[in-house]
Amino acid sequence: MKTIEIDDEVFAYLQSNAIPYMDTPNLTLRRLFKMNGMPSSGDIPQEKIKTSEYKRGKQPKTNLQTLIKYNLLQEGQTLFLHDYQDKRIEGYEAIISGKSLLWNGKTYSMSKLAEICLKKEGYTSNSVQGPARWFNSDGIRVLELWQQLLDRIK
C-alpha cells in the first residue's frame, strides 16, 4: 500500500461519491476509475457485509449489486451462460441490471434465467444454481467472484 496526500476539495469529492458505511476512499476511487479486480482486504468493510448478509451462519446469497460495489462486476456488463460441463452455450448472453439479469427485454434472477435457457437447450432440471452457470467474459463464474469476496471478509 502507498500513502498519498489529497487536499480538502478532493477528499470532499470522494466523500460525495462514496457509498455510506460501505466504501473506503480506495474503493470509491476504484469505482470512479472503473477499475476491476479484488481490492486489498483492508478496503472491504468487514462488519457491514458480515452483519447485513450472513444469517444464522449460512453463506449469504450471491448478490450482483454487492459484486458491482466491489468492482468485481459492472452494471451493464454481459454475462454468458455455460452448461453443466462448463461449456459456453452460444446465443445466451444477459446484461447485469441492478440485482437482476436483463434478457430479451425482461429481468430475471440469475437462477430463473439459467433454468429457462437450459430448458430451451434440452436440460430438465427445475433447480438451477444460477451463479454457477453465469460467467464473465474472462471465463470466471459469478459464484467464484462471490466466493472470492466472502473469503476476503472471513
Image: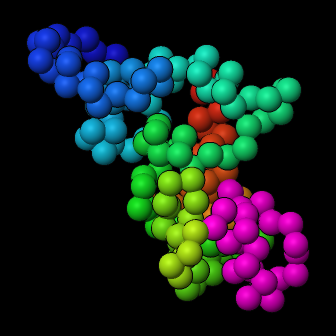
Q: Is residue 48 left or right of residue 55?
A: left
Q: Which percent across, then down, holds residue 24?
A: 39, 21
Residue 80 visible to an observer of this rendering:
no
Q: Nearer the viewer, residue 100 or 60?
A: 100
Q: Locate residue 59: give its quadrant.
A: top right
Residue 58 located within the stretch drawn in magenta: no
**Residue drawn 78% across the image and 84% down it:** 119
The segment highlighted magenta reads: 108-131
Rendered image quadrant of residue 118: bottom right
**Residue at x 53% of width, y 70% of height:** 102
**In what quadrant of the picture does the C terminus appear?**
top right
Percent x, y of residue 57: 84, 26
Q: Quadrant of the N terminus?
A: top left
Above or below, 47 relative to 95: above
Quick check: 67 left or right of 111?
left
Which of the two residues, 58 or 140, is positioned nearer the viewer here? Answer: 58
Is residue 111 within the magenta segment? Answer: yes
